[in-house]
Amino acid sequence: MSQLFQLAKTCPRTGARAGMLTTPHGSVHTPLFIPVGSQGTVKTLTPHDLESLGVGMILANTYHLFLRPGVETISRAGGLHRFMSWNGPILTDSGGFQVFSLGHLRRVSDEGVVFRSHIDGSEHFLSPELAIEVQEALGADIIMVLDECPPYGDDDRHIKQAMNRSHIWAERCQRRHNREDQALFGIVHGGTFLEQRKQSVDYLTSLGFPGYALGGLSLGEPKDLMHSMIDETVPNLPEDRPRYLMGVGSPEDLVKCVAQGVDMFDSALPTRLGRNGALFTQKCRVSIGNSHFKGEVGPVDHECDCYTCRNFSAAYLHHLFKCQELLAYRLATIHNLRFIVRLMEQIRQSILDDTFAAFKDDFLGRYQPTDADVRVEQKRKWLDSRLKKQHLD
Amino acid sequence: MSQLFQLAKTCPRTGARAGMLTTPHGSVHTPLFIPVGSQGTVKTLTPHDLESLGVGMILANTYHLFLRPGVETISRAGGLHRFMSWNGPILTDSGGFQVFSLGHLRRVSDEGVVFRSHIDGSEHFLSPELAIEVQEALGADIIMVLDECPPYGDDDRHIKQAMNRSHIWAERCQRRHNREDQALFGIVHGGTFLEQRKQSVDYLTSLGFPGYALGGLSLGEPKDLMHSMIDETVPNLPEDRPRYLMGVGSPEDLVKCVAQGVDMFDSALPTRLGRNGALFTQKCRVSIGNSHFKGEVGPVDHECDCYTCRNFSAAYLHHLFKCQELLAYRLATIHNLRFIVRLMEQIRQSILDDTFAAFKDDFLGRYQPTDADVRVEQKRKWLDSRLKKQHLD
């Protein structure tokens, strides 16, 4: 595979970088936000929608696709790109994060992890080697090593044990990986312990990966702690390799973490917030279900260039959400994703123009996130459990 | 308003007609299928999607929009076209059908009908005059008189009473109607009683409407009875006015009823079937959830030119439905609507080419509807009741 990452510019006042990722399915600019399409679809959107929004790369979850429809179905279709009809770059995770989220439904050993499907309770085994085989069959452009993800708040000893196991697994993944048209990323661990993070960087860079992810962050730890970990980790990573922060996607976090030198991000947050009626605007996140939108004949965000804002009033969106019309979820997803993609474009341009530091201060000075995230997350969990039992009309 | 309907050609061997409807929002070909967008959205689709599918006109329900978001909100937005960002022709019904479907939640008198909202139980009054005022405020291109719709199986006496009341209401609607840029259609009633149907045609044509609907059909009566009523009604309607059969939308019914001289149809069936995973193909309707689609790498319908069939395998659709992904409902809706729109295009072309009779025989000879309609309808009612209590994620 040719060089994955080309660095174009580094901000003289912050750690921000502009660059490009070159994959077998096209090149994409960094800093890059990667929407999540867990089950082979970014919820509510077609590949055509994604292109129109300027989305450069999407993420699919190996755990979900492994269970349903299964590797055989996707292989028979000619791989994940063809199965979902997306011809741009794809990144797959290893499945580790989801498996370790299963709590009592999984058992881990040095060999791998035995887990039960959240769909039908069937038992499965995932090892570093299998995670690579599955990802090779799916055929993403960027794939990830299998890692053990302890929750935030776990004790020092367990975090260290999981990190050491993840290091050995990373090496096993690297040995097993054959496809030269895929870039395999290592994942830095060590929880919120600085010394362990440093050890993890040393170990993984000694193995040499074409890119490095920062794992085990954005798991509920205080934001300051997350930023400290990034600050202490990123400078020790090789300059010519992309840095990928997993699970971060709020506007303010994206701006802050780009300033810390991160190049790639993925998160389900923008699309999930959209489906729950929480929409980004230039000044803050708003709740479209709020009654004051009932008579609002202007768009949700006057400065937005998305299909939703160009064609529909906030009153219409409010109406669709009140009626639980399926179009509501699509229009809101389009808006939120376009907001984030455009934010990344603006960030990149300001880096190239040497104005990123001012852009950052301006954005963080005016943008007010709300505390709705927590409520949305609670609602989502409740809804997830409901959705398993019913269908839609 | 200029002449609404121009007849272009009549089939020499059947009653089929090809023509054109000219409205302030553009001209559309007949025979015409009109998808249902009850709440100001054809479920899952944007106006852009509808255009891409070749949809010429959409129907919106006055009952739904009157209750939510209310006439004031839509007026403030500049009317329904602007509210929902659809610049093509719109037809609104009068609200009568929905109100009379409420059963014990409504009370009818000569003056009008008092009903309770299915959303919040609030009490409302609808009269012929109000039905027109609301439809004038919504601003559709074609609007309907308020009618009383007794269920199929009601006794002769009640059907007659409802018909007589509907006649008087039609006259009151006509008197109240002011907007010259809207065409107000009369609705023929009389249940499945031939003599009453004739009376209804005589009465309504004596009032003189720019178009005539056939109401009170497709309500569960045997199909033969429906076709008999159409056969006995249509020849008595003026040749230069469009004939609109309300509530019909299966492929086989459309072909048969066009042959009987009907020009316009509306139905939620194609879109509802789609959301339930029942997809039209050239030979029959298939259930995409069927396990034999799991490995089907070809499209659902090899002859279809829709976005779904051009880009996705049946296996992918099967996967999306199994996962209850929102994209499933949109892709299936796109397919079913395009199937019906294309069928209407083929019908029209064959009428113009003098080959409609052969087209009809060929289509009805090869197309096998299934009995899934009944099951889908049962499922829908159950789901409707569930959906009122919960939200989506």
Image (tube, coloured by chain):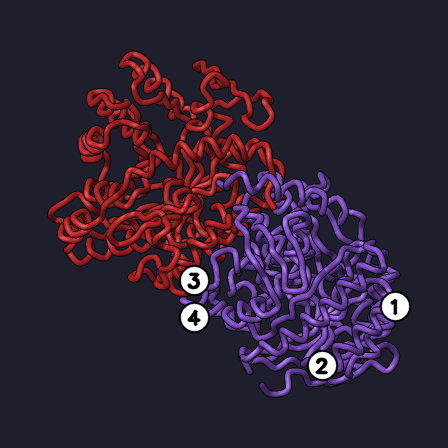
Chain colours: A red, B purple
Q: Would residue A70 be seen by someone viewing this image from the given angle?
A: no
Q: Which quadrant of the figure has residue B109?
A: bottom right
Looking at the image, is B249 positioned above or below residue B1?
above
| Label located before the other in sequence (1 or 3) | 3
- Please give the chain letter of the residue carrying mark 4: B
Q: Would residue A203 be found to the left or right of residue A293 on screen?
A: left
- Please give the chain letter of the residue carrying mark 1: B
Residue B73: mark: 3
Q: Residues within 10 Å of mark 3 (few under 14, many from 20)?
A: many
Q: Position of residue A126 (x, y in %)?
A: 50, 23
Type of amino acid under label 1: Leu
- Tell which of A45 and B200 is nearer to you: B200
Q: Are marks 2 and 3 on the same chain?
A: yes
Q: Which residue is mark 2?
A: B207
Whole-angstrom CA distance, mark 1 to mark 2, is 20 Å
Residue B194: mark: 1
Q: Are marks 4 and 2 on the same chain?
A: yes
Q: Residues within 10 Å of mark 1 (few under 14, many from 20)?
A: some
